Amino acid sequence: MPKVKFLRSGVEVEVPQGANLRQVALEHGVELYPGIHKALNCRGLGQCGSCRVLLKNGTMRNASPKGMIEKLTMLRSFWTIGCEDEVRLACQIRVQGDLEVLERPPANFSGTYAVEAEAARERLRQGKL
Ligand code: FES
């Protein structure tokens, strides 16, 4: 059975092949939605974009391919810029293999996620870049 590791919450679970990632998160108490979106979201219809996650360490290939609804939602969203393959909607993902999931990723105004940008700044400060 595939393993899903949620990086912010530290929850790691084994799930059946084909499990829906949003359902997995909700069943295990992982908070997917930031702020007001806890109450205001589309309940898994793939239209609000508030369940977005970042699939880390190359695990995006273990998620089901994007469908038409997800592609359309992504098209009207700035948060995919520069991370088109890694950013996905949890409600549209069927787990097909091990996943490392950063839930509630920071806003992406620059095309680089803040986590990676901060890590790069730290490497630069240490003279490792
Ligand atoms: S819950 Fe709205 S897009 Fe996933």
Image (cartoon, rainbow, N blue to C red):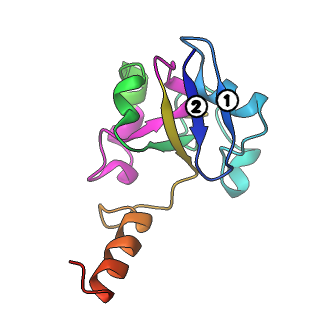
- Please name the residue shown 37% across and 80% down the image: 122
Q: Quadrant of residue 39?
A: top right
Residue 81 falls within the magenta-colored stretch: yes
Q: Which mark is residue 13?
A: 1
**Residue located at (48% from left, 27% from top):** 98
The residue tagged 2 is 4
Q: Is residue 102 above or below residue 46?
A: below
Total marks shown come to 2
- Can residue 61 be seen here? The reply is yes
Specify the segment rendered in magenta.
Answer: 73-97
Vertical arrangement, residue 72 with respect to residue 82, above or below: above
| Residue in the image at 42% along x and 24% along y | 63
Visible residue check, residue 45: no
Q: Please, what is the three-letter code of the amino acid marked with disc 1?
A: Val
Quadrant into which the C terminus falls: bottom left
Q: Is residue 62 left or right of residue 102?
A: left
Q: Position of residue 56 (x, y in %)?
A: 42, 44
Check if mark 2's residue and mark 1's residue have beta carbons within 8 Å: yes
Task: Identify the residue at horizontal 59%, vertical 27% (top origin).
Answer: 21
Q: Position of residue 3 (x, y in %)?
A: 57, 26
Q: Amino acid at mark 2?
A: Val
The percent coordinates of residue 26 (x first, y second) are 74, 32
| SS of the residue under disc 2 | strand
Tell me the SS state at disc 1: strand
**Label 2 packing within 10 angstroms: few (<14), some (14-19), many (20+):** many
Query: Is 25 a magenta residue?
Result: no
Q: Is residue 23 left or right of 124 when viewed as pictured?
A: right
- Real-space Cα distance between discs 2 and 1? 5 Å
Q: Residues within 10 Å of mark 1 (few under 14, many from 20)?
A: some
The location of residue 97, given as percent across then percent down, is 46, 21
Front residue of 36/27: it is 27
